[in-house]
Image (cartoon, helix red, strand yellow):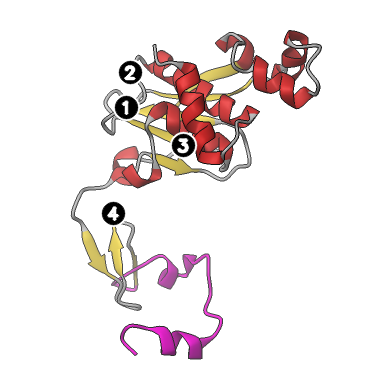
Amino acid sequence: MTDLKLLLDLSAALHQHLCPRQVLGVRMGLYAGRLLDLALPQQDKRLWAFVETDGCFADGVSVATGCRPGRRTLRLMDYGKVAATFVDTETERAVRIWPNPDARARAVRHFPDAPSAWQAQLEAYQIMPDTDLLNAAEVALNFSLRALISRPGVRVNCAVCGEEILNEREVWVDGRVCCRSCAGESYWRPHDPAWQRENSADS
Protein backbone atom coordinates (compact mmCIF):
# COMPACT_ATOMS: atom_id res chain seq x y z
CA MET A 1 0.00 0.00 0.00
CA THR A 2 1.24 3.47 -0.85
CA ASP A 3 2.46 5.34 2.21
CA LEU A 4 -0.11 7.98 3.16
CA LYS A 5 2.43 10.19 4.93
CA LEU A 6 4.70 10.25 1.91
CA LEU A 7 1.85 11.37 -0.33
CA LEU A 8 0.77 14.02 2.16
CA ASP A 9 4.34 15.30 2.29
CA LEU A 10 4.39 15.53 -1.50
CA SER A 11 1.08 17.40 -1.51
CA ALA A 12 2.20 19.75 1.26
CA ALA A 13 5.35 20.55 -0.70
CA LEU A 14 3.19 21.99 -3.46
CA HIS A 15 1.56 24.43 -1.03
CA GLN A 16 4.18 24.83 1.69
CA HIS A 17 1.58 23.59 4.16
CA LEU A 18 -0.88 20.75 4.68
CA CYS A 19 -4.62 21.30 4.99
CA PRO A 20 -7.69 19.06 5.44
CA ARG A 21 -8.71 19.31 1.79
CA GLN A 22 -5.35 18.01 0.66
CA VAL A 23 -5.82 15.06 2.99
CA LEU A 24 -9.28 14.44 1.53
CA GLY A 25 -7.86 14.54 -1.99
CA VAL A 26 -5.14 12.04 -1.18
CA ARG A 27 -7.52 9.76 0.73
CA MET A 28 -10.05 9.83 -2.14
CA GLY A 29 -7.37 8.97 -4.67
CA LEU A 30 -6.13 6.03 -2.63
CA TYR A 31 -9.69 4.84 -2.00
CA ALA A 32 -10.38 4.96 -5.74
CA GLY A 33 -7.36 2.75 -6.32
CA ARG A 34 -8.71 0.16 -3.90
CA LEU A 35 -12.24 0.28 -5.31
CA LEU A 36 -11.03 -0.03 -8.90
CA ASP A 37 -8.21 -2.45 -8.04
CA LEU A 38 -5.50 -0.21 -9.48
CA ALA A 39 -2.00 0.41 -8.17
CA LEU A 40 -1.58 4.13 -7.52
CA PRO A 41 0.05 6.55 -8.12
CA GLN A 42 -0.02 5.33 -11.71
CA GLN A 43 2.87 5.49 -14.12
CA ASP A 44 0.66 5.16 -17.20
CA LYS A 45 -2.59 6.84 -18.24
CA ARG A 46 -5.08 4.13 -17.37
CA LEU A 47 -6.92 6.12 -14.68
CA TRP A 48 -8.67 9.42 -15.34
CA ALA A 49 -9.86 11.71 -12.56
CA PHE A 50 -12.57 14.35 -12.79
CA VAL A 51 -12.28 16.70 -9.82
CA GLU A 52 -15.26 18.90 -8.97
CA THR A 53 -13.28 21.79 -7.51
CA ASP A 54 -9.77 23.17 -7.89
CA GLY A 55 -7.21 24.22 -5.28
CA CYS A 56 -5.57 22.10 -2.61
CA PHE A 57 -8.03 19.24 -2.98
CA ALA A 58 -7.21 18.74 -6.66
CA ASP A 59 -3.49 18.62 -5.90
CA GLY A 60 -4.12 15.95 -3.27
CA VAL A 61 -5.99 13.84 -5.83
CA SER A 62 -3.20 14.34 -8.36
CA VAL A 63 -0.44 13.32 -5.96
CA ALA A 64 -2.27 10.16 -4.89
CA THR A 65 -3.32 9.01 -8.35
CA GLY A 66 -0.68 10.28 -10.74
CA CYS A 67 -3.47 11.93 -12.75
CA ARG A 68 -2.35 15.34 -13.96
CA PRO A 69 -3.57 17.96 -16.44
CA GLY A 70 -0.24 17.76 -18.22
CA ARG A 71 -0.81 14.07 -18.88
CA ARG A 72 -4.42 14.74 -19.89
CA THR A 73 -5.68 12.43 -17.15
CA LEU A 74 -7.12 14.99 -14.73
CA ARG A 75 -10.01 17.30 -15.61
CA LEU A 76 -11.68 20.06 -13.63
CA MET A 77 -15.47 19.92 -13.58
CA ASP A 78 -16.05 23.17 -11.74
CA TYR A 79 -19.04 22.35 -9.51
CA GLY A 80 -17.53 23.76 -6.34
CA LYS A 81 -17.64 20.36 -4.61
CA VAL A 82 -14.92 18.44 -2.81
CA ALA A 83 -15.64 15.33 -4.85
CA ALA A 84 -14.14 13.42 -7.74
CA THR A 85 -15.00 10.70 -10.22
CA PHE A 86 -12.34 8.17 -11.14
CA VAL A 87 -12.55 6.16 -14.35
CA ASP A 88 -10.60 3.03 -15.32
CA THR A 89 -10.17 3.52 -19.06
CA GLU A 90 -9.63 -0.22 -19.65
CA THR A 91 -12.73 -1.55 -17.89
CA GLU A 92 -14.73 1.73 -18.13
CA ARG A 93 -15.71 1.32 -14.48
CA ALA A 94 -16.24 4.67 -12.82
CA VAL A 95 -16.62 5.56 -9.16
CA ARG A 96 -17.52 8.92 -7.65
CA ILE A 97 -16.20 9.67 -4.17
CA TRP A 98 -17.16 12.51 -1.82
CA PRO A 99 -16.80 13.26 1.91
CA ASN A 100 -19.27 11.76 4.34
CA PRO A 101 -21.56 14.65 5.40
CA ASP A 102 -20.74 13.82 9.04
CA ALA A 103 -16.97 13.76 8.48
CA ARG A 104 -16.32 17.11 10.16
CA ALA A 105 -18.32 16.20 13.25
CA ARG A 106 -16.66 12.81 13.43
CA ALA A 107 -13.25 14.46 13.18
CA VAL A 108 -13.98 16.56 16.27
CA ARG A 109 -15.05 13.42 18.13
CA HIS A 110 -11.74 11.80 17.19
CA PHE A 111 -9.77 14.79 18.49
CA PRO A 112 -11.97 16.60 21.03
CA ASP A 113 -8.98 18.42 22.54
CA ALA A 114 -7.72 19.82 19.23
CA PRO A 115 -7.22 23.61 19.34
CA SER A 116 -9.69 24.08 16.47
CA ALA A 117 -12.11 22.16 14.28
CA TRP A 118 -9.67 22.71 11.39
CA GLN A 119 -6.87 21.00 13.33
CA ALA A 120 -9.18 18.16 14.31
CA GLN A 121 -10.06 17.63 10.66
CA LEU A 122 -6.42 17.73 9.61
CA GLU A 123 -5.51 15.00 12.08
CA ALA A 124 -8.65 12.87 11.94
CA TYR A 125 -8.90 12.75 8.16
CA GLN A 126 -5.57 10.96 8.15
CA ILE A 127 -6.72 8.10 10.40
CA MET A 128 -10.48 7.73 9.94
CA PRO A 129 -11.59 4.53 8.16
CA ASP A 130 -12.52 5.05 4.51
CA THR A 131 -16.18 4.32 5.14
CA ASP A 132 -16.35 6.83 8.02
CA LEU A 133 -14.62 9.55 6.04
CA LEU A 134 -15.87 8.99 2.50
CA ASN A 135 -18.89 7.98 0.47
CA ALA A 136 -18.58 6.21 -2.88
CA ALA A 137 -20.90 5.13 -5.67
CA GLU A 138 -20.40 3.52 -9.05
CA VAL A 139 -21.46 5.93 -11.81
CA ALA A 140 -21.52 6.25 -15.58
CA LEU A 141 -20.26 9.26 -17.51
CA ASN A 142 -22.73 11.33 -19.53
CA PHE A 143 -20.23 11.69 -22.38
CA SER A 144 -17.85 9.51 -24.34
CA LEU A 145 -14.52 9.12 -22.59
CA ARG A 146 -13.02 7.86 -25.86
CA ALA A 147 -14.04 11.09 -27.59
CA LEU A 148 -12.56 13.11 -24.73
CA ILE A 149 -9.26 11.25 -24.91
CA SER A 150 -9.23 11.66 -28.72
CA ARG A 151 -6.35 10.44 -30.89
CA PRO A 152 -2.71 11.54 -30.91
CA GLY A 153 -1.53 13.82 -33.68
CA VAL A 154 -4.97 15.02 -34.79
CA ARG A 155 -4.98 18.75 -35.51
CA VAL A 156 -6.82 21.17 -37.77
CA ASN A 157 -6.90 24.94 -38.21
CA CYS A 158 -9.92 27.12 -37.55
CA ALA A 159 -11.34 28.57 -40.77
CA VAL A 160 -12.08 31.86 -38.97
CA CYS A 161 -9.13 32.73 -36.71
CA GLY A 162 -6.59 30.33 -38.20
CA GLU A 163 -5.49 28.97 -34.82
CA GLU A 164 -4.65 25.30 -34.47
CA ILE A 165 -7.17 23.02 -32.74
CA LEU A 166 -6.01 19.83 -31.01
CA ASN A 167 -7.74 16.68 -29.78
CA GLU A 168 -10.75 16.90 -32.11
CA ARG A 169 -12.24 19.86 -30.29
CA GLU A 170 -13.33 21.56 -33.52
CA VAL A 171 -16.96 22.17 -34.43
CA TRP A 172 -18.58 22.64 -37.82
CA VAL A 173 -20.47 25.84 -38.60
CA ASP A 174 -22.04 26.40 -42.04
CA GLY A 175 -19.76 23.79 -43.55
CA ARG A 176 -16.57 25.28 -42.07
CA VAL A 177 -14.37 23.84 -39.34
CA CYS A 178 -14.19 26.28 -36.42
CA CYS A 179 -12.70 26.49 -32.97
CA ARG A 180 -15.24 26.74 -30.19
CA SER A 181 -14.45 30.40 -29.61
CA CYS A 182 -15.24 31.35 -33.18
CA ALA A 183 -18.34 29.13 -33.04
CA GLY A 184 -19.70 31.31 -30.22
CA GLU A 185 -18.65 29.23 -27.20
CA SER A 186 -15.82 31.52 -26.08
CA TYR A 187 -15.05 32.25 -22.42
CA TRP A 188 -13.32 35.53 -23.48
CA ARG A 189 -14.00 38.48 -25.79
CA PRO A 190 -11.72 41.00 -27.50
CA HIS A 191 -11.06 44.07 -25.38
CA ASP A 192 -8.55 46.27 -27.16
CA PRO A 193 -8.21 45.60 -30.92
CA ALA A 194 -5.30 48.04 -31.17
CA TRP A 195 -3.30 46.12 -28.56
CA GLN A 196 -4.07 42.86 -30.37
CA ARG A 197 -2.81 44.26 -33.69
CA GLU A 198 0.38 45.53 -32.09
CA ASN A 199 1.13 42.23 -30.35
CA SER A 200 -0.02 39.71 -32.94
CA ALA A 201 2.65 37.60 -34.58
CA ASP A 202 1.20 38.18 -38.05
CA SER A 203 0.62 41.95 -37.70
Q: Is residue 96 visible?
A: no
Q: Residue at x 78, y 23 (%)?
A: 117
> Which of the labelled discs sits on residue 39, or is there none?
2
- Badge 1 crowding class, 10 Å Cα cut-off, few under 14, some 14 to 19, many 20 or more, is some
The residues tagged by marks 4 and 3 sit, at their Cα atoms, a distance apart of 18 Å
Three-letter code for the amino acid on which mark 3 is drawn: Phe
Mark 1 or 3, closer to the camera:
1
The image shows residue 19 at horizontal and vertical percentages of 63, 31
Q: Which residues are magenta?
A: 174-203
The residues tagged by marks 3 and 2 sit, at their Cα atoms, a distance apart of 18 Å
- Seen from the viewer's position, the closer of residues 111 and 89 is 111
- Badge 2 crowding class, 10 Å Cα cut-off, few under 14, some 14 to 19, many 20 or more, is some
Q: Which of the marked residues, 2 or 4, is nearer the chain's N terminus?
A: 2
User: Element under label 3?
Assistant: strand
> Which of the labelled discs sits on residue 42, or is there none?
1
- Seen from the viewer's position, the closer of residues 200 and 153 is 200
Three-letter code for the amino acid on which mark 2 is drawn: Ala
User: Element under label 4?
Assistant: loop
Query: Relative to 7, is 151 on the left or the right?
Result: left
Q: Are marks 2 and 4 in contact (CB under 8 Å)?
A: no
Q: Are marks 1 and 2 in contact (CB under 8 Å)?
A: yes
Which residue is labeled 3 in the image? 50
- Badge 3 crowding class, 10 Å Cα cut-off, few under 14, some 14 to 19, many 20 or more, is many
Three-letter code for the amino acid on which mark 1 is drawn: Gln
Q: Is residue 150 visible?
A: yes
Q: Is residue 105 above or below residue 158?
A: above
Q: Is residue 165 above or below residue 145?
A: below
Which residue is labeled 4 in the image? 167
Mark 2 or 4, closer to the camera:
2
User: Element under label 1?
Assistant: loop
Three-letter code for the amino acid on which mark 4 is drawn: Asn
- Badge 4 crowding class, 10 Å Cα cut-off, few under 14, some 14 to 19, many 20 or more, is some
